[in-house]
Image (cartoon, helix red, strand yellow):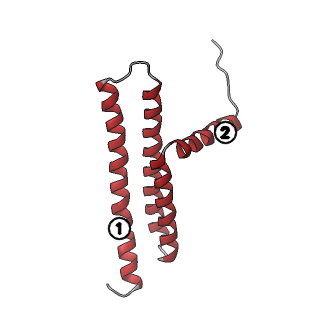
Amino acid sequence: MKLHRRSWSSKFADAFRGLARAVRSQSSFFVHLWVAAIVVVAGIVLRVSPVEWCLLVGAIAVVLVAEIFNTAIESLARALPVGRHPRIRDALDMAGGAVLLSAIAAALIGAIVFLNRAGELFGIW
């Protein structure tokens, strides 16, 4: 069996199509993008350090990646002809839980970075 080799441009095009599909089809992904934009603006305004930028960007990336995996699992579940099944529900709930956990962790990271930075800038501590 001969495997079809795809070009790098084709692989990137498919990946960007997947990103666009996630943004268009999932309102929660769109919300995460808006929150990410607010975090970036806050980081600029509060002049976060390079290490703090790494923490914030990493937190944003983890949430967006979790949301994309959740969206992919939802898409697969909708494509199955099985209908409602407890194992599918479990998979969807776990994927949603992963998004929730990543969002909570990202919020904590953001709170630590921004409260610390605001405290330093405004002379609170």
Name the kind of residue labelled 1 in the image.
Ala
**Quadrant location of the N terminus in the rendered image:** top right
Residue type beneath disc 2: Ala
Q: Is residue 22 left or right of residue 67?
A: right
Q: CA distance from mark 2 to mark 1?
A: 36 Å
Image quadrant where one finds the C terminus: bottom left
Element marked by disc 2: helix
* Residue that sits furthest to the top in the current view: 1
| Residue 13: image tag | 2
Left or right: 42, with 90 as reference point: right
Who is closer to the viewer here, 16 or 58? Answer: 16
Residue 52 image offset from top left, x and y in percent: 44, 68
Instruction: Name the residue rendered at 42%, 84% in the picture.
Output: 121
Q: Which residue is mark 1?
A: 111
Residue 63 or 86: which is nearer the viewer?
Answer: 86
The 10 Å Cα crowd at callout 2, few under 14, some 14 to 19, many 20 or more, is few
How crowded is the residue under tag 1: few (<14 C-alpha within 10 Å), some, or many (20+)? few
Q: Position of residue 57 (x, y in %)?
A: 48, 59
Can you say whether 82 is above or below 12 in the image? above
